[in-house]
Image: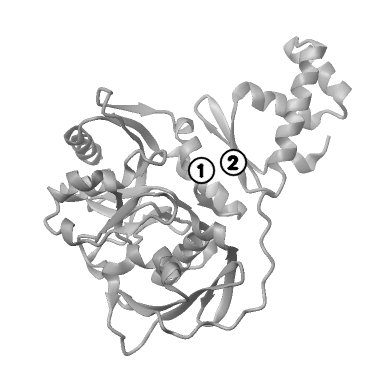
Amino acid sequence: MNVKLTPKLISQLKNNYIVWFETSNQYIVISDTLKDLIEVYLISHSQADFITQLHIDFNISSAQAELYYNEITNVLITSNTIVNPKSQQSPIPLTPKKALNLYYGFGDTTMSINFGSQSIKNLIHPQFAHATIEKPNAVSCHFDIYKYGDSLYLLKNGAYIEHYSISDFHLLQGRFAVELINLLYDKQEADWIGTFHASTVCNAKEAIMIIGDSGNGKSTLSALLMASGMDVIADDFTPLSAINQEVYRFPSGISVKEGAFVILEEIFSEFDQFPIHPSTSKHVNLKYIPPVNDFENSILHLPCKKVVYVKYDAAVSSTLKKVDTDQILATLIPESWLSPLATNAQLFLDWLQNLECFELQYADNNFAISQFKKLFEAL
């Protein structure tokens, strides 16, 4: 068989396994049985050899073995296919005049962003509006973000970073977020295990990551937890370092949807004064709640060994239960960026081994808050 189809890394998660394919940077969870079948597949010399071995080792019929052969072939080929090849560098078009140039401060780090238009400004600015400052004496970094033709361009200190189709503006937002954490912590892309589509809360000792499907209230819950004395270290974008396997602060505001306004305006005295922004991805209005502390007065990174999958449902009884790690991977991985480096992939698998995972279904906000307090107390 083709040894090039062999997974680069494999790690056991209780009764299942998670495997990583270097070519595609793809992770898949497989059962113990499927792992055994793949191992037979990879050492077999032909389809006939595979079918014979399955009959000898597992007493599987030829017809069923042929089905397994075809399914495994499809899985391995798909998992070794590059899904999103990196775009080619484009000639840098002229940058627009600095009509929409704003400055932001995060402790000792300052940056300026030249937005090509008001609509492009709306893609980035609202979540960092709380960090807007007057023009400083010196700027740590300058970004240009503008439209040319059918593409959005990102430049850093005049150097081309990447460009994206206008319809893929979320990729621009994600890349800018990575450039920002690199700037804040003097790191490079290779220094991160990944960045997760997750909100993360913390106390002075540890962080807890909150994941969930879109619309399940991650950010609203984060705001409620912040109002209850916890700190939100990241909202919707949580970076995990390869240096120390800790999560790092991402200094954005907490984005909350219009459906939560009534609840939150009773808790945050200045909520009515926060501007309303239309969502860039959905037909809904948003507000951004600023962080409680300034960046320079905040804890910047902490270990994270707990992940909670949350689901708000007014019709269910509120429960918190422990679950196996593989049960949260279908939510944790797909919308995240994970490093394509083998060393970082191994660190990610090692990090998963030490996780405690929970599922929180709740209809009562006070119940959810009390459960997080208990999780922080259980050190």
Which picture quadrant has residue 93?
A: bottom right
Relative to 68, residue 347 above or below: below
Relative to 189, residue 27 above or below: above
Q: Give amino acid for label 2.
A: Tyr
Which residue is disc 2 drawn over?
Answer: 27
Seen in the image, is 291 located left or right of residue 42? left
Which picture quadrant has residue 273?
A: bottom left
Q: Quadrant of the N terminus?
A: top right
Q: Earlier in the sequence, mark 2 or mark 1?
A: 2
Q: Position of residue 351 (x, y in %)?
A: 46, 44
Sort mark 2 into few (<14), some (14-19) or many (20+) by Cα contacts within 10 Å: many
Q: Residue furthest bottom?
A: 137
Seen in the image, is 339 located left or right of residue 39? left
Seen in the image, is 249 located left or right of residue 298? right
Q: Is residue 229 visible?
A: no
Q: Position of residue 353 (x, y in %)?
A: 46, 38
Q: Residue at x 49, y 43 (%)?
A: 350
Which label belongs to residue 333?
Answer: 1
Q: Quadrant of the C terminus?
A: top left
